[in-house]
Structure formats: C-alpha cells, structure tokens
Amino acid sequence: MSAFLTYLITGLALGCSFALVASGFVAIHRVTGVVNFAQGTFAVVAGLMAGSLLGRGLPHGLAEILAILLAGAVGLVVGVIAIGKRGTPPLASLVITLGLGILAYAVEIIIWGDQPISFQMVPGSVDIAGAPILRQYLVVIAVALVTFAGLGLFFGRSYLGKALTACASNPYAARLAGINVMRMGLLAFALGGLLGGLAGVLVTPLQPVAFDSDVALATNGFAAAIFGGLNRPGLALVGGLVLGVAEAFVAGYLSGSYQTEVALALMLAIMIWRASRRVSVAEEPA
Amino acid sequence: MNAPRMVGFVLGGLVAVAALLAPLVLSGSQLTIYVLLGTAAMVTVGVSLLMGYAGQVSLGQAAFYAIGGYTAGLMGVHGLPTVAGLVCAPLVAGLLAALVGIPIMRLRGHYLAFATLAFQLILLSVVGQLEVLGGDIGLQGIPRLGIGSAQLSNTQSYAWLTWAATALVLLIARNVITSRAGRGLRALATSEIAAESSGVPVARYKLAVFALSAAFAGLAGGIYAFFLGYIAPGSFPVLLSFEFVVMAVVGGLGTIWGPVVGAAVITVLVQVLNSLGTEPGMPPYASSVFSYAVYALLLVLTLLFLPRGLLPTATEWVRRALRGREPPAAGDRPAAAVPTGDASGSPAR
Amino acid sequence: MLEVTDLVVRYGRATALDGVSLELAPGEMVALVGPNGAGKSTLVDTLSGIVAPAAGRVVLRGRLAQVPEGRQLFAELSVADNLALGAWRSGRGRAGRDPARVFEVLPDLRPLAGRLAGTLSGGEQQMVAVGRALMADPDILAVDELSLGLAPRVVADLARHLRELNAERDTTVLLIEQNARLAFDLCRRAYVLESGRITASGPCVQLAESPQVARAYFGGTTEGAGDPVPGGARDP
C-alpha cells in the first residue's frame, strides 16, 4: 500500500512537472498557433542558471526567480526570431524554434559545460500514510496547482488574457479590433519562457539537467499538452497527471526502462485518436 | 531545351562526373567523409520529397536510417548474403514506414513532427533493450559487403557504391517529381484541400512518399552499416534526424539537387569546423559547439531569409543573369522551404 | 467624413484596387455593390488599416469599425467577451468594455451574452459582429456582406437595426453588398465596384434603372438573399 502511495504521489509530481512544461506549449500555441519546439530549452536554461547562481552563493528564491526571468527573456528572443518576421507560416516557425533549440545547445555548452547539473531546493522527505515522499515532490505539486489556477484566471477572466486568446482564435478579427497580434504573440512567447523556466527550476532538484535534456522535457510536455488540443491549460494539467502517474506505475511495478515508451506511445495514441475524431474537419485550429 | 536548363544539365553532369572521379584522388579520411556525405544526401532526398511534396515534416527520419542499418547488419552477422542485406535494408525500412504511416500520416503539421520524433525515440529505446540487436552496445562485426569471395574491402569501393546508390536515389526522385503523381503531390504541398478536391488521392500519395523517403534512408543505413561494420542505438540520435531536416531546408525543398547541395554544404562546413575545433588550444567542447551552431544558424537564417533554400535561390540568380532582369515564369516557382499549409489561421480572403 | 482618392492596392503582382475614389458625408448610408472578387473587402480592409495601399489617399474623420465578411467572431469566446474585445482600441476602462450600451441597441444579444460565439446561428453571429463593431463607438460603420448566407427574414431584421442606428444615432454606414437589391433598398446612394474600379455611382434610384446595373445585379440571379450557405463563423 505504501509503495502504491509513493508511486502515486511521485507520479502526480512528475505529472505536474510535465504539465508545467505543457503550459508553456499551450500559452504559446493558444495565442500564436505555433508549436514551440524550444519549450524544453527554456526549462534547461532556467535549471542550469539556477544551479550556477546557487553555486555562487545566491540565496534560494532569488536564484530561482532570476533563472525563471532569464528563461522568460529567452522566450521573448525565440519569439522575435520565430514569429517576428511577418508571413512566417506556423510550420516554418516550428522548424525555426527547433533550430533555436539546437543553437541553445552551443550556448549552453559554452556557459555551463556538457555535464548534467542538479541542486537541492527542499531537501528531505516526509511520511504520508507510511509512504516516504520527497518534499520536493510536494513543492512541485503545490506550485503547479497555483500556476494552473493563475493561468486559468488569466486566460478565462482577464481582459488581456481574452485578447491573447482572440489572437489565435481569429487573428484577422483581432487586428480589426485593434489588437496588435504580433505584440501579443511575443508576450505569449515570454510567458511560455517563464512557465518553461518555472518547470526547469522545479525539476532540476529531482532529475539532473544537461544541455540536451530538452528533447525529453519537450516530448513529455507536448504529450501532456495535446490532451487539451494544445489550447486548454486545464486539460494539459489532466494530461500531465495521467502521463506522470502512468509512467510512475510502469516504472514502479514493471521496469524503469519502459517509462519513455509508455509516455511516447500514449502520446501517439492520443494524437491518432484525436485525428480520427475529426476525419471530416478540414484543419486543426492553428 | 532553353539555356538555363542546358546549364543545369551540364552542371549536374559535371558534378556527377567529378563525384565519380573524386574517390581516385581523395585520401582515406576524406573518403570516409565522402561516404557519409553520400548517405546523408540519400536520406535528405527523402526528407526533401516529404517536406516539399507531401508538405510534412519528419523529425524521425534517422529511425529509418537505423532500421536500414540494423536490417543489413543483422542479416550480415547471421551469415546471410550481404547483398541480400543491402537489398532488404530499404525494403524493410519502406515497409515499416508504410505500416507506421497508416495511422500517423493522418496527423498534420506539428503533430506529425512530434509523432515521427516519438517513433524514433521509441525505436531507439526498444532497440537498446533487445538482446538480438545487441542492446545498447549494438551490432559488432558486421561483415564487409560482397558477393561470394569478392568483397568491397577498401574505402574507395564504398565511395563508389555510395555514388551509385545516390545516383539511383536521385533518379528515382526525379522520376517521382516529373511523373503525374509528382504534379499531384506538388498541389498537395500547397493546399491539401485543393489537391483533394481536384481528385488527387492525398492520403495514398502521402503514405507513398513517406514509405519512399524511408526506403531511401534505409538504403543509406544499409551502406553505413556495411561501411563501418558496427552500429548501435547511439549511432542514430535524434539530432541526426534534425540534421537531415536542416540539410533539406538549406539545400532547397522539393528539388532534386537541393538535398545534395544541402548535405554537401553542411557536411563540409561541419568537417572544417571540426578540424578547427580540435586544434590545440581549443576547449574540448569546441567542435560540438561549432557543429550545433552551424546547424542552427544555417537552418534559421535559411528559413528566414532564403525560404526556398540555397539551390533554388542560386538558380534564380543564374537565370536572371542569363535572361536579364526578366521575372521568372509563373510555373517555375519551387515550393517554399516549409509548406505554408492551411494551418496559418488567417481567414481565407 | 470619409474621403478616398485614387486608391491603389496591390497583392504582389495582382492589382486589387485600381484608382478607387469615393466619399461619404456624415450621417449618410451608402452602398458599395459589386460581384465577387471586385475588391470590396480589400477596400474595407484598407479603410480599417489592415491592408496598406500602394498609392492614393484615405482621409477619415472619426473612428471606423468594420463588421467583416463572414462575421469573423472569436468562436471560442463568449458573446460577452467578443463584445468586450470590440472596445480594445477605444479604451480599456471597465466602463468602455461594458456591453450594456450595445444591448440597448441590439436587445436580442442580451440573453446570448454567456453563449460561446461559435455555437450561435448565422443570424445571431451577424448580430454579435455588428455589436462588436459598435463597441468601438464608431462614427462610421463599414458592414461587409451583411446578408451573406442568412435567411431573408433575418436579413430584414438586421437591416432594420442598421437603419435605426443610422437614423437615431447618426452613425454613418457603408454597406458592402453583393445583394444589390438589399443595398439599394437600404441606401440612397451607391457605388458600383467591378474589377477594382468604380464603374458607376449615384443615387440608387438611378442606378437601379441603368441597364448595365440592372442586367448585372437584378438579372434574376441575385446571390445572397436566399443563399443556403450555412452561416457559421470561421472554421473553429
């Protein structure tokens, strides 16, 4: 029973971290229609930066916040390059973000080297119903829930959030209404960077991060994000949790080596299922 | 035949002849680069067809490269005729692509990009756990390619084999592009809906191109396996798939020679920087930093500033120089680097 | 109010508008008719500042809001949110975004406020589109294809609202229509746009009698009025 609980809570925490990466995908896609392949990069940059700031003696809190802000700035830069040139089609933007992700490899290696780094945030573990749970897991779960509540309020209630949604819903009408679609897109990229950075800062204490951790982070985040069609933060959270729990149980009861396959196969299955549901629909919303 | 086309034919012929003669003068390590360039070009021709003609991005093309390599390698280490291995490599890769493609080619745009990436990650992970395939250590002692006792033993002979295989791939690609189906496919890359409504069997064509591109990758993988004599999951990283996309985009999508140009430019550039990066005094990570930077910058700059790719842009310049500043004929326009698709979200107006 | 002089708009090599001039006086209700592809929507988009002209001059005194062809609602947002976003340009204060003033003019919208725009009928969507444009407190309302895909009864209702707006609130209206019968019914003056040029203009009574216009627009195949095209918003 206690093993079950451990796996469950581990899975939920893992799922929350996927969901945080997913939220960045959603924030950017919902507004710009672009799938940002560099989403994993934001997390990696923040994780590495937080590690080296802490290493230089900056206090917890400040180091993490600076790292997240850096990720937000990186997000803005990626946005400027990926969508800043008028008339760049979304699929070209995707390939551009892929290129920027590779470029980030070069920069990251120069700054931080090519070895994985980690740091401690909230050390130790607590007993929940007899199951030892790392405190860091609880932090991840709490932050993710707060973040998603905030995102829900932002997109669902605030005027700016609605204007952001309007940009992807109908860019032409948004422009008619006087909304600067390009500026909103850049804002979304910055937001995506912050969210990715948040994920990175929280994940690094659990799982060392290296320059090339981005692919795994991005695929898991993307898998979570497609639960909600890349547009719905709430469903992305659900997606992340399902994925995380599934991975944790597979790793716990079967074998850790099947973890990736489970996540990826689940992602493929969901995409194919979603595609088969809209045979007659012309296009996925972009 | 008009003048620019003539120039194109002559140039193509010259390149082919020069490439055929090159193995005579290249040194050992240069020959290795020659072979790797050729195999990269073969894979890239497929990626280019897929992106430029079927309007789809594959981020997992190295998976089919791996399937070809493992097919040839496995048959080789079990004592089957190596030539059979080389023939089976593209067939198995193409067949598997057709099977996998039935569900995933229904996905569009970014979904397909992630699906192909996921396919490769799953494949690598599975291969790494299968004893028969040597697990993470890989397949070792793959015999040299040969018929009976006649073996391709030196690097030079592999260079010529690569030349012949590349020529075959280019010929097939040319036939596909100029065929009736090819014209249907071009319509497909511009607008799937328009293609469908004009009677092009969109789904079947997309699947066919996907399988064909996988077969090209499989053939390249087979040559690679026999050439190196050793393959492992680590030989086919995700980054390799990205590299093929970079080569395809940089060279120019939907053209016959574009992928060759892309593969050549990038391979040579990376090699030059590689030797620069291993100079004394350079930090140990220099060469990997250089190659990441080259891939990334070429990809991004091409997409932003030469969206049609190097070769079509250069051809256009030559054409203008030959004809004066006359605008190009409407029918000549090659596909844009990445198909605009219908997913831009802008209302049809 | 609005003065357009020798306007030229090009898309790449194609010329969409070729020397268009027109004029609207304050409080006027003017029709712009023409066949599909004549450049009508390009003209409104240019007036809205969405399309940049290659040559010519647009002088606009006051604010112009456009009711775009095909409604172009934000399908995933509620009617209330669609309306609120109409006020984005004019001011972001809470009062500016309150749709109450539009509900006064278009009371049928009030009960729809909480519905998602994408789930409404064509007529309801068109009304939301008009309401959203009104949220910008425009001096000129440019309505692009009001009747497209709507049942005649619905069109009549919307037309009545437009007439009220024009008569009671002094809003200047530019009505862009393929359905010339409707346009000539509503407006006193009209321009005919064909292949990017104004080919005729004047009082609707005269235009309707001119053999050229009669043949082109009243020849029995007036599109629009009973058109069975479903009036959905843009594909969601």
Image (spheres, helix red, strand yellow):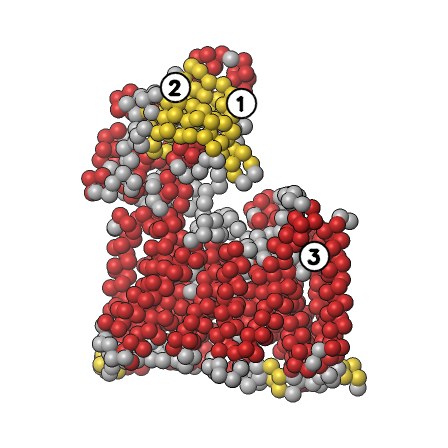
Q: Residue at x 55, y 55 (%)?
A: B306
Examine the rendering and report whether any part of residue B109 can be seen. Answer: no
Amino acid on which the number 3 mark rests in the picture = Val
Residue A134, x across and y down, in percent = 27, 80
The spot of residue B144 in percent (x, y) is: 71, 84
Front of the two marks 1 and 3: 3
Q: Nearer the viewer, mark 1 or mark 2?
A: 2
Q: Which residue is mark 1?
A: C221
Q: CA distance from mark 1 to mark 3?
A: 46 Å
The chain containing the residue under callout 3 comes to B
Q: Residue B203: which quarter of the image?
A: bottom right
Chain under disc 1: C
Q: Is residue B8 left or right of residue C62?
A: right
Please state the horizontal and vertical placement of residue C164, each as a whole percent of the image: 29, 22
Q: Residue at x 23, y 71 (%)?
A: A62
Are dots 2 and 3 on a single chain? Answer: no
Element class at badge 2:
loop
Mark 3 Cα within 10 Å, few/some/many (few <14, many 20+)?
some
Residue position for label 2: C187
Q: Toward which corner of the image does residue B123 lie, by quadrant?
A: bottom right
For disc 1, the neighbor class at 10 Å (few under 14, some 14 to 19, many from 20) is few
Query: Is circle 1 on the same chain as circle 3?
Result: no
Badge 2 amino acid: Cys
Disc 1 marks a residue whose amino acid type is: Thr
Note whether C140 is above or below A65 in the view shown.
above
Residue B117 in the image: above or below residue A286: below
Q: Quadrant of residue B34?
A: bottom right
In the rendered image, the residue lying farthest to the left is C95
According to the picture, the residue beneath numbered tag 3 turns out to be B176
Q: Residue at x 41, y 79 (%)?
A: A113
Labels 1 and 2 in the same subunit = yes
**Residue under the image location 29 percent in, 76 percent down:** A53
